[in-house]
Image (tube, rainbow, N blue to C red):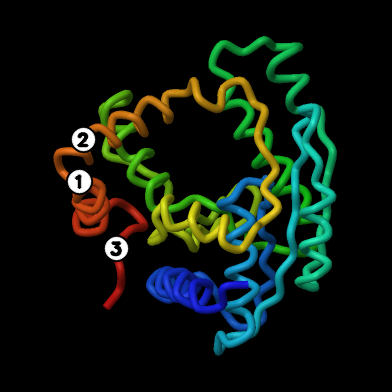
Amino acid sequence: MDIRALNEFTGIIRKAVDDYKMIEEGDKIAVGVSGGKDSLLLLVALKHLQSYYPKHFELEAITIELGFEGMDFAPVKKMCEELDIPYTCLKTDIKEIVFDVRKEENPCSLCAKMRRGALNDAIKSRGISKLALGHHFDDAVETFMMSLLFEGRLSCFRPVTYMDRSGVTQLRPMVYAGEGKITNLAEKLELPVVENPCPMDKASKRHEIKEMLKAMSADYPDVKSKIFGAMQRLPLPGWGIEK
């Protein structure tokens, strides 16, 4: 394992954790593990952070299996065993409901809502009230641009979000980590990424925005950093940093 690279990445995670006061002494934190590079690296980084962070916290990993064929989470289970992290994989019929029964034309919103509901139920049954998600820097910028262009709103998910209906606090410790850095480190660490066979993976509105930002970055390399900085300086609700 490339400890130097992991140390550097975990430092980025810690800055977000400290800036937005994500972790308190004695917290039990569940990590939503989809099998993708983002959530797997988040899990590894939080485990590394756990070894030296001044506030003691516990970790669990939970996968909500959507029902797509060909997704094998056995390597993820093995990785969690090696890291000494409790792991649960819950099978659901979300894919069948969204694609086969309801035949949603725009399935991403319903799928995400059902995944969140299943995750919240799973962690609450374990007495856990904090859920760490793998959303990163690029996700934040893309979400902001989607709200601006498609809805005419200045909006984005928050680094820390308390969901009053479920009593769950969502954490996004990777909001300072760029997708390129995540991809490179996941490859270096040879994480057991589970490929996503969802037919909407490259056909969503988010993918359109991702491609648009990629094209803009060719001429203006710092455009995403400028957008992200504006989100903090405005600040968007939940994005201000207390000094």
Where, quadrant-wise, is the N terminus in this rendering?
A: bottom right
Q: Which mark is residue 216?
A: 2
Separation of residues labelled 3 and 1 (CA atoms) = 20 Å
**Relative horizontal placement of residue 78, taking residue 17 as reference (left or right):** right
Element marked by disc 3: loop
Q: Looking at the picture, how far across and down is residue 226, in whole percent?
A: 19, 51
Circle 1 packing at 10 Å, graded few (<14), some (14-19), many (20+), is: some
Separation of residues labelled 1 and 2 (CA atoms) = 7 Å
Q: Looking at the picture, how far across and down is residue 61, in whole percent?
A: 74, 59
Does the CB distance between marks 1 and 2 fall below 8 Å?
yes
Kindly identify the residue that appears in the image at 70 percent across and 12 percent down: 102
Kindly identify the residue that appears in the image at 19 percent across and 50 percent down: 222
The answer to which of marks 3 and 2 sits earlier in the sequence is 2
* Identity, as a three-letter code, of the amino acid under mark 2: Met
Tell which of 227 and 11 is nearer to you: 11
Where, quadrant-wise, is the C terminus in this rendering?
A: bottom left
Q: Hey, which quadrant is residue 139 in on the image?
A: top left
**Relative horizontal placement of residue 46, taking residue 212 as reference (left or right):** right
Where is mark 1, residue-wise?
223
